[in-house]
């Protein structure tokens, strides 16, 4: 992935919480001695503080989905068959990706498709010369409809291997199915259908759909400035990444040309990000290995979509110049059907598209500055005539973004402090008290990169991924969850010299806290020069 100027100083040389990456259980990797004075030829395998996927104690069956070595951009293609011996209504389905790589390699992006459904979007760690291993776990129970039938499989982690970049990415993907059994492990409540878009943007839903949710694995990546979209500036400012409207980005979905959803993209930092892979050699940034999709509740549009005809569904990212590449936006559509009716009718009854705000203000000086404020609000409602009465669904979503970007001529100083919020309430009103599902998401980034005397490049960076969700019925809170994933790193090395002359040092830490009606989880990690110095569980 290309890095702009200071962010490119290494040229020539990442749904609810539920993923874990690493080589062992909590506490197993804690260092017993002092960390080295600087990075050497090897370091600890990647690990994160995120909680593991909770699984029931029922019978399980494992299926290998893909096993491949990636040297170029040739995808792996194979076949999938459902497991035997665990039924076809599972309590939990867990995807596990295991990888290894040695030598020298950039961070690479990848995906796994089963039956055309994107079940994982990921990136890779950068290896040590002696080699590393890592793993990713993900709850994929919601894709059970796809997994009940034989399916084609496609997987790709695009890679380049040559005399300089020697790392071959070796991966294995498996699915573990946990059989449903008894009151402690009932069959999971999952969508009846999992659909993809035909021809890139055409969707035909079952005529009795009563809930429709689209999920989009939106990633700004693939090299170029959209990998660092949050650092882009307007055309008049002297900076290496410029776009007409500055850094404000918004992932939009439209149905037949009408806006049907807005979302703030997560500011993912991959494992070469901010010009400094020494930040990420052990602890990756939040979501770097497991890209979570943004979700849109399209139920108010179900009355239109249920007419049996194909409808145009399009995803775009505002702020990206027309015709410019750099974003990937694959779409899955999850559908719940009304078992009591063959056709569910209805209509979109309200659609209020607020005026988008995007105000980047550039101030010139010895230290250039860009102050940006952006935001958008969308509210829409629709009713459906179901077998259990008329149901009205209202979606209200509000986005906001503020950031301050500072840099000097030549970008020897490059700093950003930004906050993104994405607040959504979905209200369902039918028989009985109305139900409201509220989600409040906040993403933060506060970082500075400096290139000083002797070409010593230092990056200090803090990232935050916080969310609060609650379900209310009749105004009373029935369940809630709060998650807080906080990363901090500080790394320095000598740029523009061979690896063995970089004299790199770096510390990093992550704390993942999860609380709510389901219980408590709190784990923290600390590293120094590639050695884990703390691995602590608090609850």
Image (spheres, rainbow, N blue to C red):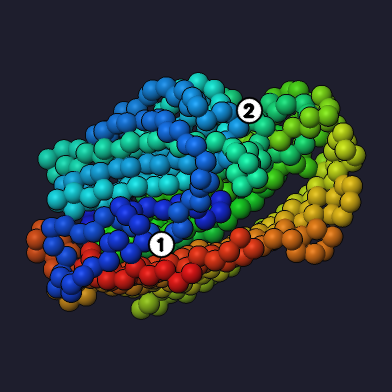
Q: Residue at x 51, y 51 (%)?
A: 54
Q: Distance between the Cα atoms at labels 1 and 2?
A: 39 Å
Q: Are marks 1 and 2 in contact (CB under 8 Å)?
A: no
Indicate the quadrant where residue 434 lies: bottom right
Q: Nearer the viewer, residue 307 or 530?
A: 530
Element type where label 2 sits in the image: strand
Q: Residue at x 61, y 47 (%)?
A: 184
> Looking at the picture, does residue 124 appear above or below residue 474?
above
Element type where label 1 sits in the image: loop
> Looking at the picture, does residue 221 appear above or below residue 112?
below
Number of marks in picture? 2
Q: Is residue 7 visible?
A: no
Q: Which mark is residue 377?
A: none
Q: In the rendering, at what x and y percent does residue 118 appear? A: 50, 36
Hey, which residue is sitting farthest bottom in the picture? Answer: 366
Q: Residue at x 70, y 28 (%)?
A: 205
Tell whether 334 sits left or right of 534. right
Q: In the rendering, at what x and y percent does residue 430 appear? A: 87, 47
Tell whether 9 sits left or right of 350. left
Q: Nearer the viewer, residue 39 or 19?
A: 19
Q: In the rendering, at what x and y percent does residue 531 appear? A: 23, 66
Q: Which mark is residue 202?
A: 2
Comparing labels 1 and 2, the label whose residue is closer to the camera: 1
Q: Residue at x 18, y 74 (%)?
A: 34
Tell whether 433 sits left or right of 425. right
Q: Nearer the viewer, residue 480 or 75?
A: 480
Hey, which residue is sitting farthest front in the picture? Answer: 182
Q: In the rendering, at what x and y percent does residue 76 appear? A: 34, 27
Q: First in sequence, mark 1 or 2: give its number.
A: 1
Q: Nearer the viewer, residue 59 or 32?
A: 59
Q: Which residue is mark 1?
A: 49
């Amino acid at each position: 992935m290309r890095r702009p100027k200071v962010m490119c100083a290494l040229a020539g040389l990442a749904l609810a919480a539920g993923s874990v990456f690493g080589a062992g259980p909590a506490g197993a990797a804690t260092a017993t001695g002092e960390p080295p004075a600087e990075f050497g030829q090897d370091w600890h395998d990647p690990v994160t503080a995120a909680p593991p996927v909770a699984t029931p104690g029922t019978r399980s069956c494992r299926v290998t989905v893909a096993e491949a070595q990636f040297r170029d951009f040739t995808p792996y293609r194979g076949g999938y068959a459902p497991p035997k011996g665990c039924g076809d209504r599972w309590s939990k389905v867990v995807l596990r990706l295991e990888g290894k790589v040695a030598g020298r390699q950039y961070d690479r992006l990848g995906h796994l498709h089963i039956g055309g459904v994107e079940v994982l979007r990921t990136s890779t760690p950068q290896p040590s010369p002696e080699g590393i291993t890592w793993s990713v776990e993900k709850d994929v129970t919601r894709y059970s409809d796809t997994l009940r039938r034989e399916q084609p499989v496609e997987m790709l982690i695009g890679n380049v291997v040559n005399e300089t970049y020697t790392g071959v990415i070796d991966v294995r993907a498996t699915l573990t199915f946990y059989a449903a059994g008894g009151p402690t492990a009932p069959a999971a409540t999952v969508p009846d259908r999992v659909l993809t878009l035909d021809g890139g943007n055409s969707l035909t839903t079952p005529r009795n759909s009563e809930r429709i949710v689209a999920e989009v694995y939106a990633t700004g990546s693939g090299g170029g400035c959209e990998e660092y979209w949050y650092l882009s500036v307007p055309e008049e400012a002297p900076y290496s990444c410029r776009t007409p409207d500055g850094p404000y980005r918004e992932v939009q979905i439209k149905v037949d040309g009408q806006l049907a959803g807005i979302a703030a993209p997560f500011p993912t930092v991959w494992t070469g990000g901010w010009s400094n892979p020494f930040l990420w050699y052990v602890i990756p940034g939040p979501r770097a290995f497991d890209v979570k999709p943004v979700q849109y509740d399209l139920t108010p549009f179900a009355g239109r979509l249920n007419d049996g005809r194909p409808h145009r569904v399009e995803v775009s990212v505002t702020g990206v110049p027309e015709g410019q590449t750099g974003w990937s936006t694959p779409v899955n559509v999850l559908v719940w059907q009304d078992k009591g009716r063959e056709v569910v009718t209805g209509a979109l009854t309200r659609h209020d598209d607020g005026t988008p705000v995007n105000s980047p203000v550039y101030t010139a000086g010895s230290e250039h500055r860009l102050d940006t404020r952006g935001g958008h609000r969308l509210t829409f409602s629709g009713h459906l005539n179901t077998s259990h009465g008329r149901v009205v669904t209202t979606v209200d979503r509000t986005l906001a973004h503020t950031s301050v970007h500072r840099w000097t001529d030549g970008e020897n100083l490059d700093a950003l402090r930004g906050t993104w919020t994405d607040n959504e309430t979905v209200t369902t009103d039918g028989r009985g008290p109305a139900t409201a599902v509220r989600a409040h998401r906040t993403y933060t980034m506060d970082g500075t990169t400096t290139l000083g005397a002797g070409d010593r490049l230092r990056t200090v960076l803090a990232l935050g991924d916080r969310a609060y969700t609650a379900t209310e019925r009749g105004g009373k809170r029935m369940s809630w969850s709060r998650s807080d994933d906080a990363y901090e790193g500080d790394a320095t090395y000598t740029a523009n010299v061979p690896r063995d002359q970089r004299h790199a040092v770096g510390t990093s830490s992550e704390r993942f806290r999860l609380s709510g009606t389901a219980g408590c989880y709190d784990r923290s990690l600390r590293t120094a020069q590639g050695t884990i110095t703390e691995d602590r569980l608090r609850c």
